[in-house]
Image: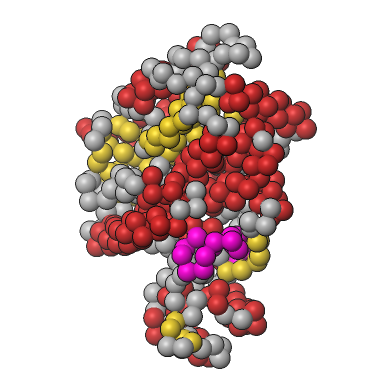
Amino acid sequence: MPATAGDLRRMQRDLDSAARALRDARDILIITHIDADGISAGAIADMTAERLGKPHTVRFEKKISEETIELINGSREDLVWICDLGSGYLSEFTRDNIVVTDHHVPDPRWRTRQTVLDSFAGIRHLNPHSYGMDGSYEICGAGMTYLLSKAVDPSNTDLAYLAVVGAVGDFQDSGHSALVSMNRTVMGDAEANGDLVVDMDLRFFGRDTRPINQYLQFSSDPRIPGLSDNAQACLQFLDSMGIRGKSGGRWRTWSSLSADERERATEAILDMVGPEERDRVFGEMYTFPNEPSGTGLRDAKEFATVLNSCGRYDDAETGLRICRGDMSALKDAERNRTEHRRHISEAMSYIRDNHLLRERRFIQWFDAGSEIKETVVGIVAGMVLSSGECRRRIPIIAFADSEDGVKVSARADRSLVDRGLDLSQVMKTASELVGGYGGGHTVAAGATIPPDKKEEFLDIVEDLVSSQVE
């Protein structure tokens, strides 16, 4: 059920209340996540606090751990602002003056365990789930953080494009091949400010940076029959379209093609895929015209990947610098991006070469051990699910070793939500039953569990998924 006018009025009242708390705070501690959505959110919060003239610190966290909870509860700052994290752990926070701008499924225990709240203390929780919206696709953590920034000062609309980066980084445009619902409000602000151009185009990765032949060759979601993974066929395709691959001795990019060249190539590619795939191949794409060409920042998908490559390799601060417009940070980001591409490629090959993917009736899974970084195993799981090399109609569960146990990432096709699937609830329930913790979204969730509980965990997940979708 979509958000009602009453829901939206209530959300605006809560945004205004949180904005007053930020304006009244002496100093602020900002806690945010390490992925593209979290870094974008952290940058929005950082610049909002800076414009308010508030002393503040930004701290990046992989997840809400016991140490993070202790840090938040024991913070000496007057106000703690938690971005793209926190909703699943509300009942664990014991201090006053916390603002949460998140989009993950909220902690159901919060209302029963919290003390009575008033307008001067407690937790100001800003989450789309509280206002009749689904945080997995209607608005992201950076989006909620931006709405609060805008409530603080309407002139902060120049930060809206960063919330678009966060939404695309969280794949919120995947289900409809476009951003929808409250994300479109954020988009509208970015467009009105001249920071965003929205057009209809092929939805493959690398429009602005990949050589045109590689742009076609590495298309994978969905695959183009006859072109994907076939370098020679891509060159022959370009030749048959009368499209020069190079100009002045350098490879052209998809973005550098003329409108006529792109239109002819697009029509031919759409003829190569089935009717069900066309909506995933072609749809809205988001360009930031004020970013330098060739940097990986003009296209939202590429911008988000730059941020992910920073955060997933323990360098979220570089991503923050980029969001703040520090172009000198791009050199550091390129090293992270190179490492990110290499690790993702090796991870996919490792899973394929070692036949790691296993199937049960209602789920499929793989255990990467220490061979895949825990910070990217969710990305890899999503890529495996969309690769055409596994069953797309059942969820995929991925394990990777981490310092505090086993990291679990779960991904599913959005069509399963219509049948009742809620991976957030599955991860939360199953992990707690084996002595761990978890949560997330209906189609993308995670957990941390003890190393010796994997089989028991899978048994529970299988039962929970079967009860939801059968």
Percent position of residue 14, x then y = 66, 25
Relative to 109, residue 431 above or below: below
Residue 255, by quadrant, is bottom right
294 in the magenta segment: yes
Percent position of residue 186, x then y = 66, 46
Residue 229 in sight: yes
Residue 125 in sight: no
Percent position of residue 329, x then y = 39, 55
Left or right of residue 202: residue 380: left
Q: Which residues are magenta?
A: 282-299
Residue at 39%, 74% in the rendered image: 229
Closer to the camera in the image, 20 or 399: 20
> In the picture, which quadrant includes the N terminus?
top right
Residue at 48%, 29% in the rendered image: 55
Q: Main secondary structure of the magenta part?
A: loop
Percent position of residue 338, x then y = 32, 62
280 in the magenta segment: no
Closer to the camera in the image, 240 or 207: 207
Closer to the camera in the image, 251 or 294: 294
Relative to 212, residue 115 above or below: above
Relative to 243, residue 452 above or below: above
